[in-house]
Amino acid sequence: MIQEQNGTFYLGNDHLSLLLRRTPFGKLEQVHFGGPVDIGDAPALTCRPIAGWGVELRYDPAVNWSNLDTLSLAWSEAGRGDYRESPIELFREDGPVGLDLIYLSHRIFQGRAEMTAPLPQAHGNCETLEIVLEDRTGDFTLHLFFTLYPTALVRRAALENHSAKPVQVASLMSMMMDLPGRYDMTTFNGRWSREMHPEQVRAGQAKVVNESRSGFSSHFHNPGFLLSAPGAGEDHGAVYGFNLIYSGNHYAAIQQNTLNLTRVSQGISPGHFQKRLAPSEVFETPEAVISFSGQGFNGLSRNMHRFVNENIVPERWQRRPRPVVYNSWEGCRFDFDEEKLLSLAREARGIGCELFVLDDGWFGARDHAAAGLGDYSVSPRKLPHGLGWLAEQIKMLGLDFGLWFEPESINPDSNLYRAHPEWAIHSDPLPDIYGRGQLLLDLTRRDVREYIVQNVGTVLDSADISYVKWDMNRHSVALGEKAHDYILGLYEVLDAIFTPRPHILLEGCASGGNRFDLGMLSFAPQIWASDDTDPVARLDIQRGLSYLYPQSAISAHVSAAPHHQTMRLTPLTMRGNVASFGLLGYEFDLDRLTDDERAELLEQTAFYKFHRELFQFGAFRREPAEEGAECWQVQAGDMALVGLFHRLMPVNPGYEWLRTDLGEKRASYRITSRRQLSSIATMGRPGTRIPPEHRGEHDFWADELPSMTASGAALRAGVCLPQRFAGTGFREGIRMQSDFGSNIYVITKLP
Ligand code: DGJ
């Protein structure tokens, strides 16, 4: 609900509320953002300086508390007494433009305010407050949009140049707010193959900045971050979440002042940024997403997950089950032919996969990473019968067919580059810099965008293709307006290709998670989370992602062991169990499967498909676990699945408890586990002591929890699991799990 009373604005629902106030001198105060309050609470929540703190500038001579540096504001600018971070900076030839933005008007309406820029926007049921600020010179108006969705507030700004002269926008944030108190800031950082590793710092009086200047939202610093009250935990304490619906350079600054107010701003990074705004032109920022939970990090994640599932991903993919994928990359790289692909597809079908994805290497001279990007005509040497035929064969095997593209990049060793070297982004007059042997195509050019739309579209229409993996493997070096216009161009291209082809499931990818953001999720409902498919590394990556993004967005595959990056040997069970808490897929050479592995894989996919709805769309929680272990729960209604993952096996492992919060204290629940198969040969000497009646047909051991019963209250307190193998002999019910042991427990309510 949004309402206005005598200059106080209220936006609120069951999860969060925002109170704003127009001061008598026209500035926009932020009275409250956090848990639900009422409009009548505004006086009690307003920060009110009485006598001030000395040597301050008084903005309005008639109001003794009008020092802007001391107020809690929802927007501000430099040069009028507020010395904190300014969300707006404009320049003309003669230097910075002084601004004094004051309230002009407002309107409240159902729905969102559409943008003119081709930026993605949140969608769904919502209500909007638009407040227009006008510069005292009359040269500029600034439109601030506050759109309320069920679990998040979305903000953006639009600046209009009413003057007769152009102006350079050096910085315009999507949002700015002052929050009361002090916070810990959690950011999600990394690099290639190690994305989303959280780091927490106390956001004190020295400014903390979370920024990407690599051209993309980046694996270095995800645009999403959290602010938590000191001491907040997974299930208690105030936690704020912030994100940006944008895939380019981003920036967020947090700084506390000496009066216990913390300023937060977020938007496009001003680093290397500049946008020329001609007279009567408007510059629109991307949307910033802000959420709050008083129930700790899990509460905040729940809000963010719901927001992504309901208000970000394209409506046609909302809550729509996603297929179990087989992807050719890690199994084949560039080295395949029709026979190999069809043999893999047969095996993939045999283990329960539903979609076969032909990754890199199917076109032009693409036998290695240094050639062919740009030429999407099928390689007659590798696929002499063409894509249409291949897709048909794969369909006949009972699988859907998907295809990989990297349409934003170009290898100089390609026909496209030889025909159009000017289509690449160069560094003139400096020498070009290559990433993975490639340059980016200049998506700010209309002819380039049209070419990509036409070229990719033709391939997509030439065969029965129901999935596309859209990859991008080099960082941008574009500066200034180009960096932003490139992202606008990308959005335009994605829209033009995929809106008319709604049957195609689009998966985003940028060397893994180099562009895992709400902008890409607005087009691609799922993203390849990381090129690191080692399940132990994935525990950290998927856990990091889980703070801000739902399982339905996280593409996660089982790959070979020893792993190609970490050289780690992990059980197939661990690989499958970790990947199941995302969108399960497989990518390794299935032609070398043993019978035991084949049997385990078939059970994995069957279990996943049986619980698909829960794994992909269930409410996700990070649960407490013993040291070195990880525990995740997905729940819907009366049912939950709990994944318990171990890292290294301690000697004589201690007790372990399964703690979950299923709601009904008095109800009874049955606890079972996934029946998972491990080869007895991998157990060494202990394996030889497993009695014959417990060995399967192929000499494997079925690890399965004997069925247990517990009340909701006992589950909350923690149900003690049977002992893990400790070298003290084999007994019925013992959990035979060594290094990287794991299982998924199934909790169902009993009638
Ligand atoms: C990088 C991606 O992250 C991989 O999954 C794979 O598609 C390769 N590119 C192909 O070149």
Image (cartoon, rainbow, N blue to C red):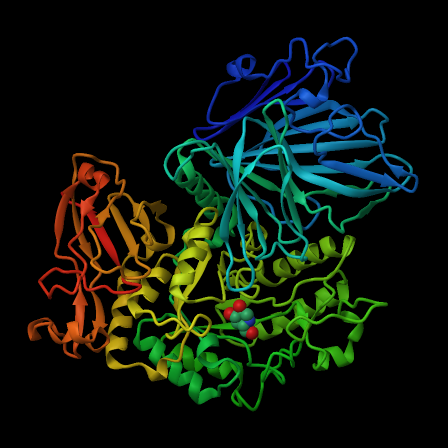
Q: Is residue 412 left or right of residue 592?
A: right
- Residue 106 sits above or below residue 94 on the image: above
> Residue 359: x percent and y percent?
51, 75
Q: Is residue 40 left or right of residue 270?
A: left
> Residue 243: x percent and y percent?
56, 44
- Residue 453 sits above or below residue 9 on the image: below
Q: In the image, what residue occupies the spot 52% across and 73% down?
A: 403
Where does the C terminus fall, quadrant-wise? Answer: top left
In the foreground, 339 or 62: 62
> Residue 401: x percent and y percent?
45, 73
> Residue 632: x percent and y percent?
33, 50
Is residue 332 visible to the viewer in this orientation of the structure?
yes
- Residue 332 sits above or below residue 79 on the image: below
Q: In the image, what residue occupies the spot 70% across and 30% down?
A: 84
In the foreground, 642 or 717: 717
In the foreground, 5 or 245: 245
Exactly how many numbered labels are in the figure?
A: 0
Q: In the image, what residue occupies the spot 64% across and 69% down?
A: 407
Is residue 114 visible to the viewer in this orientation of the structure?
no
Q: Is residue 609 left or right of residue 547?
A: left
In the foreground, 664 or 111: 664
- Residue 477 sits above or below residue 78 on the image: below
In the image, farthest residue toward the front: 651
